[in-house]
Image (spheres, rainbow, N blue to C red):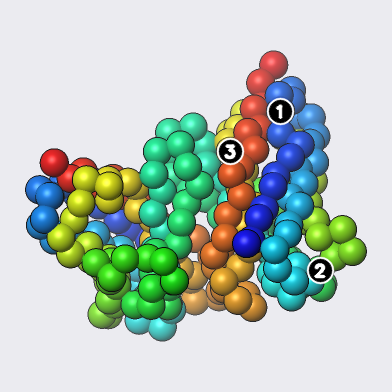
Amino acid sequence: SYELTQPPSVSVSPGQTARITCAGDALPKKYTYWYQQKSGQAPELVIYEDNKRPSGIPDRFSGSSSGTMATLTISGAQVADESDYYCYSTDSSGYPLFGGGTKLTVL
Amino acid sequence: EVQLVESGGGLVQPGGSLRLSCTASGFTFSSFWMHWVRQAPGKGLVWVSHINSDGSRTRYADSVKDRFTISRDNAKNTVYVQMNSLRAEDTAVYYCARALNYDAPPRHWGQGTLVTVSS
């Protein structure tokens, strides 16, 4: 079955750039979406259609996609950005799925 | 402001049934696809099901197909998921979410309701 693969964890120091990847064979033809989930809270959409930011999302969050890999980049990461991040896309038939999630640590 | 409020969660025995509801406000409910997403304790997000704006099209994750049924009542601004033949592995927080647009992924999320399947 189709999978979206994310690293389990990423760690950066405050002010550094954090990059979280999402790999999937269908990504060249499908959009990637990114969600942030802080502990005990509902997820929040931070990037849609590969590289667009919803209103209210700081511009330090950006997204890109190339080939079978999509990347969420957090420039100048802050302690407040510590969260779990999930990518979301669909397989070739439109079946939706999330990646396994990446825990971002900023310290 | 978009608001989604889930209800109906609780403790149910294996093999039992439960119906979750999600009442929406702050937008034209009948214009948007709706999703259910779940998260087992300490685990990641799992897409469960979605339904189109008039209720004529639905889709399910393989893990719940033939056991769960999604539906909506646009007059009541409410989306439902009927969950039958529940298993321990269905234990999770269930989130209702509104699509970004048309058949797009979730944009706005409720706070979730916990379903525990245990004897």
* x 10%, y 57%: residue: A16
Q: Which residue is mark 3?
A: B93
Q: Amino acid at mark 2?
A: Gly
- Taking the image as shown, residue A66 lies to the left or right of residue B12, namely left
**What is the chain letter for disc 3?**
B
Q: Nearer the viewer, residue A74 or B94?
A: A74
Mark 1 and mark 3: Cα distance apart in space: 10 Å
Q: Which residue is mark 2?
A: B55
- Taking the image as shown, residue B63 lies to the left or right of residue B82, namely left
Q: Position of residue B76 (x, y in %)?
A: 87, 58
- Taking the image as shown, residue B26 lies to the left or right of residue A4, namely right
Q: Quadrant of residue B32?
A: bottom right
* x 61%, y 42%: residue: B112
- Taking the image as shown, residue A33 lies to the left or right of residue B57, namely left
Q: Dot 1: few (<14), some (14–19), or many (≥20) neighbours within 10 Å?
A: few
Q: Dot 3: few (<14), some (14–19), or many (≥20) neighbours within 10 Å?
A: many
Mark 3 and mark 2: Cα distance apart in space: 24 Å
Q: Which circle's residue, 1 or 2, is located before the other in the chain?
A: 1
